[in-house]
Image (spheres, rainbow, N blue to C red):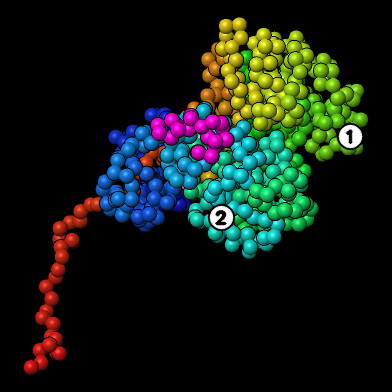
Amino acid sequence: MLSRFSPASIRRISTTALCCEKSEPDLSDPKQLALHKLYRPERITPSKRGIDLLKAPGLNKGMAFSLHERQYLGIHGLLPPAFMTEEQQAYRIMTKLRQQPDDLAKYIQLDSLQDRNEKLYYRVLCDNVKELMPIVYTPTVGKACQHFGFIYRNPKGLYVTINDNSISKIYQILANWNTENVRAIVITDGERILGLGDLGTYGIGIPVGKLSLYVALAGIRPEWCLPVILDVGTDNSELLNDPFYTGLRRKRVRGPEYDTLVDNFMKAATKRFGRDTLIQFEDFGNQNAYRLLDRYKGEYCMFNDDIQGTAAVVVAGLLASTRVTKKKLSQEKIVFLGAGGAATGVAEMCVRQMMDEGLTEEEACGRIYMVDIEGLITTSRIKSLGERHVRFAKDLPDTKNLLEVVKTVKPGALIGASTVAGAFTEEVIKEMARINPRPIIFALSNPTSKAECTAETAYRCTNGAVLFASGSPFENVELNGKLYKPGQGNNAYIFPGVALGAVLFAVKNIPDKLFLLAARMVAEAVSEKSLNTYSRVYPRLKDIRELSVKIAVEVGEYCYRHDLATLHPKPEDMEMFIRQNLYSVEYDELINKTYEWPAKDSKHGFPVPVLRRTSMDDE
C-alpha cells in the first residue's frame, strides 16, 4: 500500500521556512537512501499543455516557468517574457496584500491567488503564517462568511442539499469533483459558524479555510482535500431575504430526514473515496455536534474539531500552565463559562487527564464547575440537564452570577466558551488574581468581538500575573516595562497533526486518546522562554508544521499498536515516511529528465527481406 502515495508531482522533502533542515535524510547512508527512494513522491510530467496548463492552479507557476518549460509545454508567448523566481512572486504578492484597505480585502486577494497559483498561495501563507493565518481563518473568515454571497468568485468545494438525499445522488455529486484521490473531507451544515450562528451555505468558507490550514500547517496535499457543505436550509431570516444568498431559501430541515442525509453522505463519501477517508465535522449546531460524533466515531475515520480539537488545545494550554503554577491539573478547580459542545468537550478531556494523574472519574468531575445560560449547573436542575452535563452538577445554591461562583469555588482556572463579550469583568479577573498567585484565564470565544475579555484587560487587572489565552489573536501587551505575548488557543496546534497521521497511515477511526496525546505534545513544545518571559502558554505559530510532524508520528505509532492503521507494511522509518509525503510549496520541475538506454537496445532498424510488391512490379 505504500505505493498509493507515490504518484505525485514532487520528489523533494519540503524545505519551506516552516520545516527544519534536520528533516533532510542522510543520503550517504545506503539504508537511508533506499528508504528515501521508496518513500519519496515521484514526478509525473503533466498531460495538460498550453492555456489549459496556465489555468490549472496546481500546475501554474506564472512567470516562474523556465524557457525550456514554456517551449516544451506549449506556453511560450502566452506569458510575459520576464522570468521570475518564486521568491520574487511572493514579494510581489505580499507587497500588494499589505496595501489592501482591510482584512476582508486581503482575504479576497488571497482567495484569488489560490484560484490561480496554488504553490505560490501556500508559499506566501507558510512564509507569513502569523500574519496571514488570521486572514485565511479566524477571525477574518467569519467576516468573509457573513459577506460570502457578495464576494463569491469561483466555486470551491461541493454543495450537497437536502434535495439530493440518497447514496446514489450524493455519490454522483462527489464524482463531479476533479479528483478521485480525496483523503480528507471537512464538512459543515453551516448552523453554528464560529460565534456568528446560522450562516447557511455562506459557511462554506469554514471548510475551505480549514483545509488551507491542513496544507499550510501539516503539509497535507491540496489534491487530497475536499470542502463540503450540507445545505438543509437556514433559520436565519436575514439570509432568507438576502438577494445574494447562495443556498436553499427554506427553513432548516431537522429530525429523521436530516439524519438520513448525513448517513447517506457518510456512506457515499466512503464508497467513493474509501473507508479510510478522513471526515472532519466542523461548526455543526450543538444539538447535532455531539450526537453525530457519538454516532460515527467508532465506525468511520472522523472527528469533530469543535469538540475534540478544541478540547485538546485547551488542555494543552492548561498543561503548559501547570509548569508555571507547579500544580498538577488534577489539583486545580476549573470553572467553565459556557456549557455547549466545545466547553463540554474540554471538560471531558480534563477529566481524562485528571484520571490519568490518579483521580477517580467522580473525583475529577467534582473539580469541574460549569455555568450555562441558566447559571451554575447544580443538582436542583438534574431533570432539565443533558446526559453529558449531569455528572458535572454540583450540590450548591443556584446562581447566575459568575463573580459569586468564583468567590465560592475559588478556581485556579477560568475558561470562557460563552460567546458573551466582556463576560469576564474586571471584578471577576481581580478576584481570580486575589485567590491565585498565577491565575489561569482563557477567553476562548470566537471571533475576537465575542471574547469574554481582552488580553490587555486580563494582564492589567492581574498586574501581569495571569496566564492568558484566547480563541482569536490579540496584539502583544506592554505593562510595567514588560512585554506579554498572549497565546492563541487555536485548534491549529492539534488538528493538522492528527489529520496528517490519520491520512498517511489510513486509520480506521480516531479514538479520543489521540487528542489527549496531541495535547500533551503541544504542552511539551512550549519553550521555557515562552512561559517565563512572555507568559505565552502555546508554541510559536511558525513551529506548528514541525509540531504536526511529531504529532503525526505519535498518531501512527499509537494506531499501529492498537491495530487501527491500515497502511501495510508499517513504514520502517515513520518520521522519514511522513516528511517525504509533505506538500512542498516550492515549484516542481514539471518535465521528467530523459535518460539513455544501452546503444544496442535503442538502435533503429533491423534488416528485413525484400518485400515483393506485386502491383508495383507488373510491367
Separation of disc 1 and disc 2 at Cα? 43 Å
Q: Residue at x 61, y 30 (%)?
A: 490
Q: Of the residues shown, which amino acid type is indicated by label 1?
A: Ile
Mark 1 or mark 2: name the one nearer the start of the chain: 2
| Res. 332 in view | no
The question of residue 101 being in magenta is answered with: yes
Q: Is residue 49 left or right of residue 333?
A: left
Which of these two is toward me, 606 or 466? 466
Q: Residue at x 57, y 57 (%)?
A: 174
* Depicted 48 relative to depicted 128: above or below: below
Q: Quadrant of residue 138?
A: top right
Q: Main secondary structure of the magenta part?
A: helix
Q: Of the residues shown, which amino acid type is indicated by label 2?
A: Gly
Residue beneath label 2, please?
274
Q: Residue at x 23, y 52 (%)?
A: 595
Crowding at dot 1, Cα within 10 Å, few <14 / some 14-19 / many 20+, comes out as some
Q: Are marks 1 and 2 in contact (CB under 8 Å)?
A: no
